[in-house]
């Protein structure tokens, strides 16, 4: 089922998500719905809070070399934690909860993440480059932060001004 993606400045996006304690059918339904929603919205990642569920759950599905989002490549991460980060990279990022806006954001180049899959199995993964960006972006959502909070004061003020204009014109 496709769920509604909540958008800035919805206060729920500021919520710190809680750890999943039960790996059950309800969680599986949430993950399946998140996948359908992300694909329908042309996203590459989605955190549960973006569909108004304050749980430490995220999914990532980057396009492959053929520019196809293969479901076999889908990452479903429950209660993820970054245990190591190093290096620096700067990339343009966008967000389904801040539609139509992209900006350069500085992130770690290389990270190590520990998380659980949908069945409660513990996993550890290393990520570099764009997949590391996706992990860091989605994990920020779980702490109640949006990528726009990483912008310089000048860029953030410009964003707020442009965003208010955009909302008024709807």
Image (cartoon, rainbow, N blue to C red):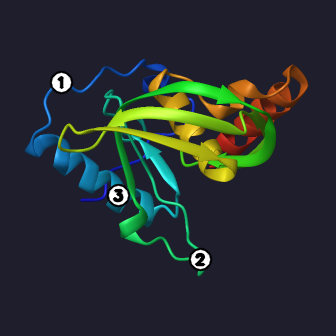
The x, y position of residue 54, in whole percent, is: 33, 27
Is 169 located above or below residue 63 in the figure? above
The x, y position of residue 119, in whole percent, is: 17, 43
- Position of 136 compared to 75: left or right? right
Contact? badges 2 and 1 (CB < 8 Å): no
Q: Is residue 67 among the parts visible in the rendering?
A: yes
Viewer-side residue, 89 vs 53: 89
Residue at 48% from the left image edge and 61% from the top image edge: 41
Earlier residue among tags 2 and 1: 1
Q: Which residue is mark 3?
A: 35
Residue at 52% from the left image edge and 76% from the top image edge: 68
Which residue is most to the right? 154
Q: Which residue is mark 2?
A: 67
Mark 1: secondary structure: loop
Viewer-side residue, 48 vs 161: 48
Q: Is residue 98 among the parts visible in the rendering?
A: no
- The crowd level at tag 2 (other Cα within 10 Å; few <14, some 14-19, many 20+) is few
Q: Which residue is mark 1?
A: 21
């Amino acid at each position: 089922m496709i769920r509604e993606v909540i958008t800035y400045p919805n206060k729920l996006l500021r919520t710190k998500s809680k750890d999943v304690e039960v790996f059950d059918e309800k969680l599986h339904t949430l993950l399946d719905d998140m996948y359908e929603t992300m694909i329908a919205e042309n996203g590459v990642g989605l955190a549960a809070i973006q569909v108004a569920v304050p749980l430490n759950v995220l999914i990532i599905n980057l396009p492959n070399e053929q520019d196809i989002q293969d479901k076999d490549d889908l990452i479903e991460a429950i209660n993820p934690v970054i245990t190591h980060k190093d290096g620096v990279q700067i990339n343009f990022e966008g967000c389904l909860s801040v539609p139509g806006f992209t900006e350069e954001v500085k992130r770690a180049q290389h990270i190590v993440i520990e998380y659980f899959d949908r069945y409660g199995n513990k996993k550890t993964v290393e990520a570099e480059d764009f997949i590391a960006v996706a992990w860091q972006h989605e994990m920020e959502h779980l702490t109640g932060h949006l990528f726009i909070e990483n912008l310089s004061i000048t860029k953030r003020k410009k964003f707020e001004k442009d965003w208010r204009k955009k909302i008024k014109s709807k």
